[in-house]
Amino acid sequence: MSLKKINFQRKTALIRVDFNVPLNQAFEITDDTRIKAALPTINYVLDNEGSVVLMSHLGRPKGKKSQKLSLEHIAQHISTLLNREIKFIDD
């Protein structure tokens, strides 16, 4: 099924994205190629009056919370690329 055949108006799309991006020791993204690859899909839903929940992982935390592997480090960058405020949920 094509994404363009779905009516996203007033609906929420759960999108599993691959935001497992490399970070330097200061937790700054060193290559955002994977994030940029997901932008057309995310923007399509948003532009068609839908809401988006993004789900990903960073590294291999082995079932334990790890500040080092938190996606919180990339949330602001995603917000900047989307030119929208995003909310990070730590769960």
Image: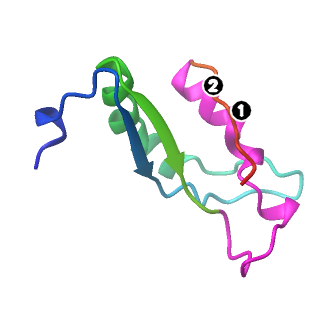
Q: Is residue 53 left or right of residue 90?
A: left
Are circles 1 and 2 on residues that touch, CB within 8 Å?
Answer: yes
* Residue type at numbered disc 2: Thr
Q: Nearer the viewer, residue 55 or 20?
A: 55
Q: Is residue 52 left or right of residue 65?
A: left
67 is higher (above) or lower (below) than 26: below
Q: Percent from the top left, x then y, of residue 83?
A: 56, 18
Q: Which residue in the protein does label 2 denote?
A: 80
Say above or below: 39 vs 63.
above
Viewed as shown, does residue 31 lie left or right of 8?
right
Give the amino acid at mark 1: Gln
Which range of residues does the magenta coloring cover? 58-83
Quarter where residue 7 is shown: top left
The residue singled out by tag 1 in the image is 76
> Where residue 33 sits: x, y (%)?
50, 49
Location of the C terminus by quadrant is bottom right
At 29% from the left edge and 20% from the top edge, which residue is drawn? 48
The residue depicted at 15 percent of the width and 33 percent of the height is 4
Q: Is residue 59 left or right of residue 4?
A: right
